[in-house]
Image (cartoon, coloured by chain):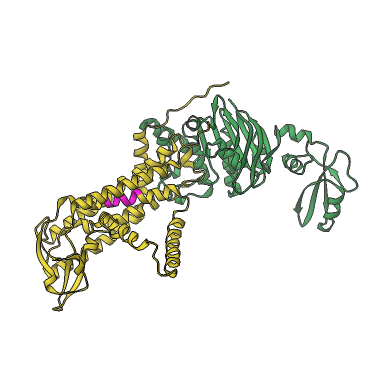
Amino acid sequence: MTSTTFHSPPRTRDVLLAQIRAVGVAPQGPALAAMAVVALATLFITIESLKTGKGIAFHPERQMLPGIMGLLLPIMVWRGEERFGASFLWTLPVDRWRHALAKVFAGWVWLMGGVALFVFWSLALTLLSGGTILAEETLRLLRSVSLASRTLDPAAVETVRWTPEPLLWLAPLTSATATYLLASALGLGTRHPLRWIVGSVIGFYVVSGVGEAANGVWLGFEPLLESVFEGPYGLDALLTARTTFLNIEATLTTGDRVEVWRALPDAGQWATATLLWMGAGLVTLLAAAFRHREGRRA
Amino acid sequence: MEIQIRNLSKTYANGVHALKDVTLTIPRGMFGLLGPNGAGKSTLMRMIATLQEPDQGSIRFGDIDVLRQKEKVRETLGYLPQEFGVYPKVTGAQLLEHFAVLKGITNRRSRREIVDALLHQTNLYEVRNKKLGGYSGGMRQRFGVAVALLGDPKLIIVDEPTAGLDPAERVRFLNLLSELGEDAVVILSTHIVDDVSELCSRLAIISKGTILLEAEPLQAVAAMRGRIWQRVIEKTGLDEIRRAHSVISTKLLAGRTVVRVHSTTAPGAGFEPVEPDLEDVYFSTMTGHYR
């Protein structure tokens, strides 16, 4: 029997730093495109602000973009890597499970950097336009949610004073994190994530179509979908603290078009939804990464 | 230090028997694993490279159980896969540094020295600051060798390295590979006989998941001496020759067909004895004439 000399495997810290550097290279193209979009948006908002003479209110919690960034980033993080095949990456002296998670973590670091820049950009734009930050706002609130419709009697609406909660400023970071965790889990856990997404959508429509054809039974899908997307702890609560669902445009019987709120954003509800979705994302990510554990033979 | 493969079998979910009870000993030096596409070479390479599990059998590298001590193997493994995925937007030097860190070479100064030395060795130093997306196929393969050599590996696996290279790049690449086999086990998996004949001190021929021959190339060729006969014929006469003789290979030469047959005695008029080469060994083995 002959003994063999070995080099020490890299420390976790070194693996993380190496992956952060490597992942940082991947989104250069999209980052440049994003910068161009931001420049255009800045120009457009500035012109609009100068024209109307109104400042912009700082509401990072109302932005869908960070959540979408989190959803799409795993594509760039894993581009060019064979996650399940005989990839060179998996022959390196780093435990495969640990290495997969290190790469996910590296992507998250860049994601947080990107989202933070986006929030700072929003803040800068607000300040430059003479807008308000955490200032008390006057909102039109529906007296009863059941009154929600596109044409409203002015009596159905009351005016309330509301101050945004600073806690909600975390929403862009948390929504991006949760969607990133879920998308990374899908990418790490399945060989063909796109097929799963398309298959799920088609499967849903086929099953619900069959259900509807059979005496219009919805098989309970509609309420379930509503809960997932617009419910108190649904995706909308995660991504925008429910502002997309709660905030509607309506026409008063007087003919005025106004912005009306079904209810005021609730930071507690947002925090619960965020914890639920981030927890779900983390659990599914760990389960997905478990597929990449080393196959140890007994 | 050698690799001992014992009774290795693998059947894929689609029913393909990729490996059938493969037993093989691979000593230190350059070892050629020769076989047609789909013979099971890549499956075997992936198993030795800790990327795939067999259904049964064992692989040992020195005192390491390859199937149970994967991390140990990877600490001393250099692997150049068939498709070496590179990050097209980073330079050769940057990516080599990145992989050096992941191989455990974390001291900045020694890492820089190792990276520079490997770039010189693979003749890529001049293009070290060029993005990998701009490398030619041959440069990429040489870069793959540089990556495989990081960390002074004692087990190097090179899977179909010359496929797609132009003749000049192939020669340059083979020269580079020839320097590797002195202190390590180097397994060169290929379907190109010339690669093995030029580089390897030992070889195995695999077909349909079974090892057909394990030998030293020079001895295998010597054993064929006096048994290979050649005749140049018109293409139309090939079927008749096939019926009458043990044809091991045919090739075209200036529009005519050169037939090589295996025979212990003179096969008849028109045939002349020829000096065998490794290709004759390969084709004789594949057609069941080499014992």
* Residue placed most toward the observer, B64 or B112: B64
**Residue B120 placement, left or right of B227:** left
For image coordinates 47% across by 53% down, the residue present is A192
* Residue placed most toward the observer, B145 or B128: B145
Residue furthest to the front: A215
Q: Is residue B248 magenta?
A: no
Output the letter for the chain in yellow. Answer: A
* Colour displayed for chain B in the image of the structure: green
**Residue A38 placement, left or right of A184:** left
Relative vertical location of residue A166 with respect to residue B275 in this rendering, above or below: below
Name the main secondary structure of what is drawn in magenta: helix
Give how far across and how far down residue A204 sits, in percent.
42, 62
For image coordinates 68% across by 44% down, the residue present is B208
For image coordinates 14% across by 70% down, the residue present is A156
Quarter placement of the C terminus of chain B: top right
Relative vertical location of residue B73 with respect to residue B137 in this rendering, above or below: above
Give how far across and how far down residue A94 sits, in percent.
43, 35
The range drawn in magenta is: A174-181
